[in-house]
Image (spheres, grey):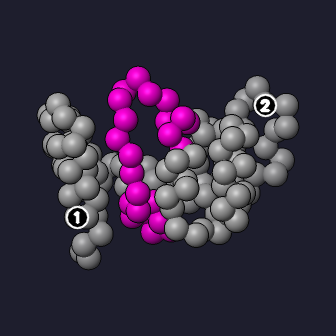
Amino acid sequence: MDAHGLPIEFEITGGQINDCTQAPALISKLPAAETIVADKGYDSERIREQVELQGAKAVIPRKRNSVKGNADLDRGLYRNRHLVENAFARLKHYRAVASRFDKLKRNYESVVAMACAFLWLPM
């Protein structure tokens, strides 16, 4: 998602695949950014290193059992993460996206791409 909550890039995976495993490849596809905001599910050193390699600041809260804690978390920037959740909510207005009727990844990916394109249209 960009700074306005509009999708830039996405990757379709199986339901059993952890999002954290796909994040480095997805981050590498993103255009240059100053910050990358993610939730606790993406709290790993591998992802933080990937973000820093791209010259961006990682705004990812650490998990509860983390030794380092959240002292360095920019909470002001993290508040913008609601834009991501809002975009997912708008994507789920499209029934074919929300229920995934398509069996083939290729077909479902096409439906999601069309729904993302609709989000980019001016209202």
Give the secondary structure at mark 1: helix
Name the residue at 19% across, 49% down: 111
Q: Amino acid at mark 2?
A: Ser
Q: Position of residue 109 (x, y in %)?
A: 25, 46
Give the secondary structure at mark 2: loop
Is 19 colored magenta in this rendering? Answer: yes
Residue closest to the eye, 53 or 76: 53
The C terminus is located in which quarter? bottom left
Give the total number of marks visible in the rendering. 2
Predominant SS along the magenta part: loop
Name the residue at 29% across, 54% down: 90
- The picture quadrant where one finds residue 86 is bottom left
Is 101 colored magenta in this rendering? Answer: no
Q: Which residues are magenta?
A: 1-23
CA–CA distance in space, label 1 to label 2: 39 Å
Q: Check the image and report above or below for 14 versus 33.
A: above
Residue closest to the eye, 69 or 111: 111
Q: Check the image and report above or below for 10 versus 15.
A: below
Name the residue at 37% across, 55% down: 87
- The picture quadrant where one finds residue 103 is top left
Q: Position of residue 76 (x, y in %)?
A: 68, 61
Q: Amino acid at mark 1?
A: Phe
Q: Position of residue 113 (x, y in %)?
A: 25, 55
N-terminal-most mark, 1 or 2: 2
Which residue in the structure is indicated by mark 1?
Answer: 118
Residue 83 visible within the image: no
Q: Position of residue 61 (x, y in %)?
A: 69, 43
Callout 1: 10 Å neighbours few (<14), some, many (20+)?
A: few
Which residue in the structure is indicated by mark 2?
Answer: 66
In screen coordinates, is 68 left or right of 21? right
